[in-house]
Image: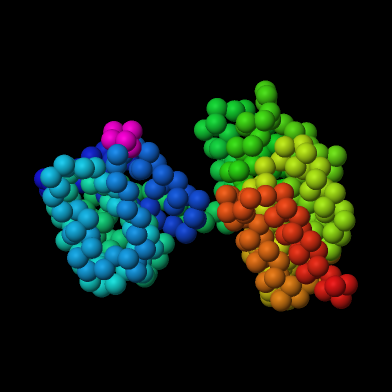
Amino acid sequence: MATRNAPTTRPDDPLAPVTLAVGQEELLLDRAVQQVVAAARAVDADTDVRDLTPEALQPGTLAQLTSPSLFAERKVVVVRNAQDLSADAIKDIKAYLATPAEEITLVLLHAGGAKGKGLLDAARKAGAREIACPKMTKPADRLTFVRSEFRTAGRSATPGACQALVDAIGSDLRELACACSQLAADVEGTIDEAVVALYYTGRAEASSFTVADRAVEGRAAEALEALRWAIGTGVAPVLITSALAQGVRAIGKLASAPRGMRPGDLARELGMPPWKIDRVRQQMRGWSADGVSAALRAVAEADGAVKGGGDDPEYALEKAVVAIARAARPARR
C-alpha cells in the first residue's frame, strides 16, 4: 500500500486522508464517522471499518492497521476519545500524519480543550479535514439545528413548528433529530405548529412525552393507557424509551441543581425552557436519588429490548413504565 506525503484533498472531501471531528456532541461525532464510512463504501462496498477506543490503540496497532496490503483494501480507521490516548499511541499517530497511507481514511474524534491538545495541533498542522461537533447549549443553536434537519430532509417547517419542537423536547440533540425524522416521514406538506402539538403534546395522540409525563408522576395506570394509545397510533418504541429517559434525566438534573439559582440562570444551566423546569419541579415530588437510578436502569433495559435485544418491545416498555412509576412513588410499593 502506497503512502502520500500530506493530506492535500479538499477540506470538504469525506475521503480526505485524515478527518478530525472536534467537540463533545455525540450525535454530531457519530454523524462525522457515518459520513466518512458512507463515502468510503460508496467507492468500495467492502471497505474495512475499524472503530477503536483509546484502550484498543496500543503502541504498534495503528502501524499494523495501516501497513501495506496485498489486496490494497480500503479502510476507515476511527479513533474515539483521542484526547485520552497514551503518549505512545499519540506518537504513532503523529508519525502516521506525516505520511498517511493510500486507501486509508483516519478519523480522529477529539473532545477539544487542553487535554491531548498536542495531537489536535499536529492533526491541524498536517492539514486534516476538520468538523466542528460542539455541544449545543443555547436554545438558538438547537433551533438552527432543527431547521437544518428539516432542510436536509427536503421538508418545509414553519418557524413556529421549529420552536415548538425545541420547547417540547429540550436539549437532547438525538431526540430532536429523531423527532424531525418522524415528522418528515409522517406528515405531508408544510410542518406547522399544530402538527407538532398533535405529535408531542396532545393527549389524544398519546405522544411519547405523555407516556413519560404520567410515568414520572407515578401515575402508572394512566401511563400504561397512554402507552397503549401511543403504540396503537404508530409511535415508534424507540421514541418512547427516549422520552422516558429524558423525563427521568430531567428529574435527576433538577434535583442535583444548585439551590437558589434564578429561574433564567437555572434554565440555561439545565438546558430546559422555564416552563419545563416548572413542570419537572412538580413531577419530582416523591423522587429520591435511588429512585432515579432504578428508573434509569429500567429505561436502559427497555431501550436495549426495543432495539433488538428482546422478543417483545411492548412488554419491555410496559415493564419500564411500571418501574418508573414505582420509583416516583416509593411509599406506595
Point 26% across, 38% down: residue: 10
Give the x, y percent position of residue 182. Answer: 64, 37
* Corner quadrant of residue 266: bottom right
Point 82% across, 74% down: residue: 330
Compared with 140, 304 (above or below) is: below
236 on left or right of 19: right
Compared with 88, 195 (above or below) is: above
Give the x, y percent position of residue 152. Answer: 52, 33
* Residues shaded magenta: 41-45
Give the x, y percent position of residue 221. Answer: 87, 56
237 on left or right of 86: right
Give the x, y percent position of residue 241. Answer: 67, 53
* Corner quadrant of residue 65: bottom left
Q: Residue furthest top?
A: 189
Point 66% across, 57% down: residue: 302
Q: Was residue 44 drawn as part of the magenta stretch in this picture?
A: yes
* Corner quadrant of residue 87: bottom left
By secondary structure, the bulk of the magenta-drawn segment is best described as: helix
Q: Is residue 275 visible?
A: no
